[in-house]
Each structure stands twice: as C-alpha cells, then as structure tokens.
Image (cartoon, grey):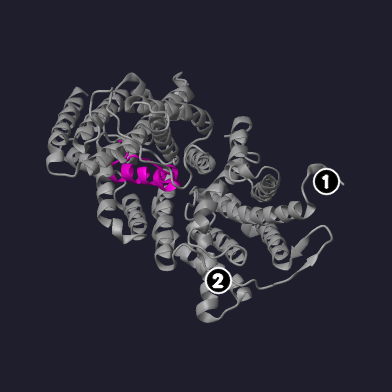
Amino acid sequence: MSGTKNKDMIVFWALMAIGLVAPLVVYPVFLMKVLCFALFALAFNLLVGYVGLLSFGHAMFFGFAAYISGYTVKVMGWNPELGILAGTACAAVMGLVTGLLAIRRQGIYFAMVTLALSQMVFFFCVQAKFTGGEDGIQAIPRRPLFGVIDTTSDVSFYYVVLAIFAIGFLIIYRTIHSPFGQVMKAIRENEARAISLGYAVDAFKLIAFVLSASLAGLAGALKSLVFQLASLTDVTWQMSGEVVLMTLVGGMGTVFGPILGAGIIIAMQDKLASFGEWVLVIQGVIFVITVLLFRRGIVGEFIAFLNRFNPPVAHDAPAGAEARPAE
Amino acid sequence: MIFELLGVPPQALFGQLLLGLINGAFYALLSLGLAVIFGLMNVINFTHGAQYMMGAFASWMLLQYAGIPYWGALVLAPIIIGATGVIIERLMISRLYHLDHLYGLLLTFGLALIIEGLFRQQYGSSGLPYANPIPGGTNLGFMFLPWYRGWVVVFSLVVCLATWFMIEKTKLGSYLRAATERPDLVQAFGINVPRMITLTYGFGVALAALAGVLAAPIYSVNPIMGANLIIVVFAVVVIGGMGSIMGAIITGFALGIIEGLTKVFYPEASNTVIFVIMAIVLMIRPQGLFGTPK
C-alpha cells in the first residue's frame, strides 16, 4: 500500500514542480483554467470513481459557487478569500440538500435525479436577479488576497490558484486513502455487503457527496475570479457533461486521471474554439470512443498496462472501472 | 363565475390546459419509450431527446426534399429514425450489456452530443417552420380549440394506449415482459432475445420520433428542441417510476397538465415545477409513484 502512495506522491510533486515553471512557457490564464477544471474533475471523480455514484448535475455546484463568489466580491466588496469561502460553503449546503434527495435512488436513477436537480438550479439562475440573467456577473474585480497578495497580474494569481489546487488535491487524496475512503470503495464494490457489515452506507454516501460538491464549488468560485466572470454556461447540463467527459477520458477512479482529462479537453476546446458546433460533435465522438474502446481512461489503461508486467497484490489493485460487475 | 373568483380569464386557463395536455402527451410518449427500453435493456437512452428532434427534422426533410406531406411523414419518419436506432443498438449499445449500466448512459449521452452538434452545424439553432397540416379550429364556447392540437392529444393518447395494450395484453408483449424478468430463461425457450432487444430499442426510438413529428407543426423544428425536453422527461420518469407502462402514461399527462396550470397561476415556477414535484416524490416515495420498492 505504502508503495503506491509513495509513487503517487512522487508523481504529485513532479506535477507541482512542472506547475511552478509552467507559466514561463504556457499562457497563465490557460493554465489557471486547466487547474480549475482539474479540481472540478477531481471532485467529481471522488464520487464516481470511489463511491460509484455518477452525478450528472455537478455543474450546479460549480456554477452556483461561481455566482456566489462573483457576487460577494463584486457587489458586496468582499476580499477574494472570503468570496471563495462563501462560494464553497454555499456549494456544501447545496450538496447537503441535493445529496439527501439523490442518495435515495441508486445507479441510473441517481444520475437522472442529479441531472434534474441541476436543471432546476439552472432555471433558478436564469430567473434570479442577482445572477444578472443572460449577462452573468461581469468584471469581477481581482482584489489582493488576504489584503496583501496581488492577484491583478495573471502570473501571481496563477500561483495562488496552483496552491489552492494542491490543497484540494491533497484533501481528496487523503480522503481516498483514509479508513473513510476504504468504506467508500467497499460501497462501490458491493453496497449490500457494506450494509451487512454494519456501515451506515447512506451517511457515508452523503458525506462523500457533500465533500465532492464543496470541492466542485471551490473550483467554480476560483474560476469566476480567474475569468472575472460568472455566467449561465457554468450551470448548464453541458458543463455537467464536460466534467464527466474529462474524468472518463483521464480515467475514472484513478488519482491523476481527472487532471490529465481536464488538460486534454481544455486544450482541445482551446484549439477548436473557432470551429463552432464541431466542438460538441468531437466531444460526443470522444465519449463514444472512450466508452467503447478504453473505458478505464488513459491513466487507467496505462496502469493496467504496467500491471501486466508487474501484477499487484490483490488488495492493491487499481480501481479500474471494469472491475465493477454489471448488476 | 368560478373563473372570476380565481381571477383568471377562462380562455387563458383552458388554453394553457390544452398546451399542458400536449406537453403531457410528449412526456408520455417519450417516457413510455424510455421505460420500454430500460425495462428490457437496463439502458437509459440519453439519445432519446435527440431522436425526438430527428423525428421532427425527418418530417421537415421529407416535405422539403421529397414533397411527402405530414400524413406520410407520420408513418415514414418513425420508421426511418427507428431504423437508425436499430443500427445504433447493433453497432454500439449491444457491446455494453455485460457492463455497469452507467456506460450505456455515457455512450448514449455522447451520441446525443454528436447528433445535436451535427444538426446545429447544418441548420443553426434558430428553428425551421413546419406548416400546420390541419389549420383552423372550433369555438367551444369557453375556449378556441385548434384542430391540430386536438388531434395531437387524441392521437398520442391512442398510441400510448395501443402500446400499453400490446405490452400488457398480447402474446408478443408477454414475451417482452418475460424477457425483462429472465432473459436467459426466455432464450432457453427458443426465443431470439437479442433480436427482440434490438427491435424494442428501435420501437422506443420510433415512439420518440413520432412525438417529434407531432411536435413539428406546434413548435418550430429546432436542433435543440430535444435537449431540454429530455431532462424534464427524466424527472417525469423518476416521479412515475419505470416499472409500469400505464404509470408512465398517466404521469406524463398529469405532469403536463400541472405544468400548464402553473403557467396560469404562478408563471415564475412553470420551468421548475416538475423538478420540485420530483424532489417531493423522492422524499415521500423514493421508488416513484408507480414503482415497486427494491
């Protein structure tokens, strides 16, 4: 066990080291976008990859937190750290309410319920006054973080985003490898057995859901400050679909898959931005190809490839989605 | 008069009720198709909304390029779109049956993105007009009834009931229900279950396309017409539960009417009322109104 953990940490610090020098070669706004979506995808993966709950409505936490942090910072004049906190807290409360409803159904119904609830939030955002309707909340100011750290320059704000991303990653990583995380995986593998072992499965699911929602909210709150914009795009079902796609491509239930997936999809959108509706088509094609040909995602397939030469100890097997039996 | 007490002119009330019934007819046709597909294949067909849109486009194209009028499209469009469904099932969905059901959802979601993206690329998202095949209407005294809208309500009710009859009361339907319970045993009795699954998917898709043809003269033919509708239909399915065919029909019509009434009395909530009902049903009866607890 500790062997994998050490390897994971080596990869993580290597990524951080790359992250530190990356703004020298890559446009920092692009990097910040990737980091925000990577955090979003990591939060989503916590639920689908480790508890086996596919949420098709995570955009509601991401987008609504973006609105809250945008509103508190722009209209109420709060500092960015408080705005981010407010957005995250709001997403946590939403996660609690929607989680209580959604965990009453399993599997496919869970996906439909979360999708419907997020559509409800979408219509609320369309009608509510504070969201600015079609315009969204624009020109959100970048005030100094904690009153001292400058965020007006993209490069300095990038390091703030990188630090928050690292904290988010470590929270998720710690959760997965805690006793709590072990129970999550037990629920994923066999819910009935987890119940018979005496675990309050619903409570575990709810806590995981709230945690995932909060971190998705953190990502959304950050994103609104990075782009100085909170808009309806972030609460649409298309956004929920995008985070599913990122996680699927990178590898559901892998530690680093969502980061890679977010990088690939964001880079693709960036390159293809001028092709209009083709982006949608290409995303659909990637969905279909991934589901039909490499369900474990890029990182998942890579781990499976490595394990072919070096079979792991049974309990240390990678959480490949294919290990899940069809009901 | 009761209407004056409610402060709503009867024309508006009945007009919205009729529109609610029509939406309810679409909810019923679509959730029926979803329920039939889910029952046999355990796949939630996310492409359903896109297939509804394709039905509307098929009738528009048949008129535009082949000169086939509405009544021909009513028969041809469901067959054509149902056939594309059969191809999709054979080529892709059938490869996923041994896996977690979520992969079926993800695959059909991807297909929906492809189809909608292609249509938007080709036709934009402003919508194309489709002429009303039966213009005119009659004044019922308390409201004006356009012939076409009356036709949509009656015809979709007939289709729903015919589907119910076929599944619940005929021999073919009994095979279908048996295969839903125990596909392996039905196969052992010499019935070609994989072919039955393929045809069932085609049938569910055809129902969606039929709803699309019916919708074309009412709403304009639009590449995004299915995307938002399908999410509401998912909520309808959660409310009704997918266990019962009649349940899907009743829930569809009832929710359409409730939505129509909300438009009259509290328009701000008309977009969200179905989702609110879904939340309430989840609290009180999580398996759905017509579902059976697991």
Q: Residue A192 carries which label?
A: none
Q: Distance between the residues labelled 1 and 2?
A: 43 Å
Q: Give the range drawn in magenta.
A: A228-253
Q: In which quarter of the image is residue B217?
A: bottom right
Report the chain holding disc 1: B
| Residue type beneath disc 1 | Glu
**Crowd around label 1: few <14 · some 14–19 · many ≥20 (10 Å):** few
Residue plotted at (65% across, 41% down): B290
Whether marks 1 and 2 lie on the same chain: yes
Report the chain holding disc 2: B
* Residue under pointer 1: B4
Residue A38 vs residue A28, the one in the foreground: A28
Marked residue nearer the N-terminal end (1 or 2): 1
Q: Can residue B75 be seen in this view?
A: yes
Q: Which of marks 1 and 2 is in front?
A: 1
Q: Quadrant of residue A193?
A: top left
**Crowd around label 2: few <14 · some 14–19 · many ≥20 (10 Å):** many
Q: Residue B59 carries which label?
A: 2
Residue plotted at (35% across, 40% down): A139
Work out whether B277 lies above or below A199.
Answer: below
Work out whether A22 lies above or below B94.
Answer: above
Residue A120 vs residue A109, the one in the foreground: A120
Q: Please say if the residues under marks 1 and 2 sit with CB atoms less than 8 Å apart.
A: no
Q: Secondary structure under badge 1?
A: helix
Q: Quadrant of residue A259?
A: top left
Residue lying furthest bottom in this view? Answer: B67
Reply yes or no: does residue A251 show up in magenta.
yes
Q: Could you say where residue A288 lies in the image, as x and y percent from the top left?
A: 35, 54
Residue A51 vs residue B55, the one in the foreground: B55
Reply yes or no: does residue A229 show up in magenta.
yes
Q: Could you say where residue B248 lies in the image, as x and y percent from the top left?
A: 64, 48
